[in-house]
Image (spheres, rainbow, N blue to C red):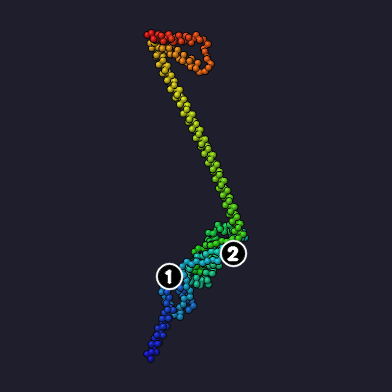
Amino acid sequence: MFSDTMIMLVVLAVVVIILFVKTAVVVPQRSEFVVERLGKFHNALGAGFHILIPFLDKIAYRRSLKEEVMDIPSQTCITKDNVAVSIDGVLYLQVIDSKLSAYGIENYYVAASQLAQTSLRSAIGKISLDKTFEERENINRQVIEAVDEAAQNWGIKVLRYEIKDITPPASVMEAMERQMKAEREKRAEIATSEGDRQARINRAEGMRQEAISVSEGEKQKRINEAEGRSREIELLAQATAQGLLAVAAAVAAEGGVTAANLRVAERYLAEFGNLAKAGNTMILPANLADIAGVVATAMSVMREEKGK
């Protein structure tokens, strides 16, 4: 009897423990569990410890409130100029309302992915191939707006959408490469011509500056030379004037006339002698009596000076 009672207690304890384990729920941080009671939505459990009613309550859905990342598979899109390009992307979304995410749609992952693909095809079809690379931001914004508008009924918030790769056909890639190569060569030729033009302008400007500097230097040289000649003439005139004043004073003094005559005779004879030494040809004055007169005058003056 005692053993039967113990067995019953043990069985009861095991059942209680199993029921406790089954009904006790710990919800992680940034998560919500949707609880149904008798098949109907009852409540959404936030982070923490919770006890459910056995056989009545069950956890129907588990939702993470963290931001989630979804890869959007690559798909072929037709551009406005009828070029087929393969595009894939990545979608960032977050559960805002766990109840709506559970009961608003069957699978919000599939729905968001499909809607992102259709919205992308629609956006690509409105622009040409060249614009697909330039208008990425605009395309991303259009996809976000389209998916987010529909996802409001699913309790989902679309945060971002980014295009990962845009792959045109091989023939288009080759044509684009040729076009880019031609554009680069064009820019290189323009840059070279602009550099040559600027170099010529710089050389011309340098030659002009050089010519101006040379002319300014020549001008200053001539001014300096003119000023030097002017100063030389001025100083020579002053010296000549002072010499003439000195000669005049000497002539006016006693014996000045005699000394002047002697000096003139000496200079006459010296210059005449130099003239005779200058070459084989002797040039004589037309009136030789003048020379004799000069010499006689000079000798007479010398004798007079010696007799004194």
Residue beneath disc 1: 29
Left or right: 180, with 46 as reference point: right
Name the front one of labels 1 and 2: 2
Residue 151, how many percent across, how many down? 52, 67
Say whether residue 48 is left or right of residue 172: left
Marks 1,2: beta carbons within 8 A: no
Q: CA distance from mark 1 to mark 2?
A: 40 Å
- Measured as percent of width and height from the top left, residue 197 is found at 56, 43
Q: Amino acid at mark 2?
A: Thr
Front one among 130 and 227: 227
Using the image, determine if residue 52 lies above or below residue 199.
below
- Work out whether 99 lies above or below 268: below
**In-front residue for pair 101/223:** 223
Crowd rating for badge 2 (residues with CA inside 10 Å; few <14, some 14–19, many 20+) = some
Q: Amino acid at mark 1?
A: Gln
Label 1 or label 2, whichever comes before in sequence order: 1
Residue visible at 41% across and 79% down? Answer: 20
Query: What element does badge 1 sit on?
Result: loop
Residue assigned mark 2: 76
* Closer to us: 43 or 29: 29
Report if residue 132 is visible in the image: yes
- Is 301 rendered above or below residue 213? above
| Mark 1 Cα shell of 10 Å, populated few (<14), some (14-19), many (≥20) | few
At horizontal 60% and vertical 60% (from top left) the residue drawn is 170
State the image quarter where residue 49 is shown.
Answer: bottom left
Residue under the point 46% across and 10% down: 295
- Numbered label attached to residue 54: none
Residue 242 position, x and y percent, is 41, 18
- Residue 228 percent coordinates (x, y): 45, 26
Q: Is residue 146 visible?
A: no
Outermost residue on the bottom side: it is: 1
Q: Secondary structure at mark 2?
A: strand
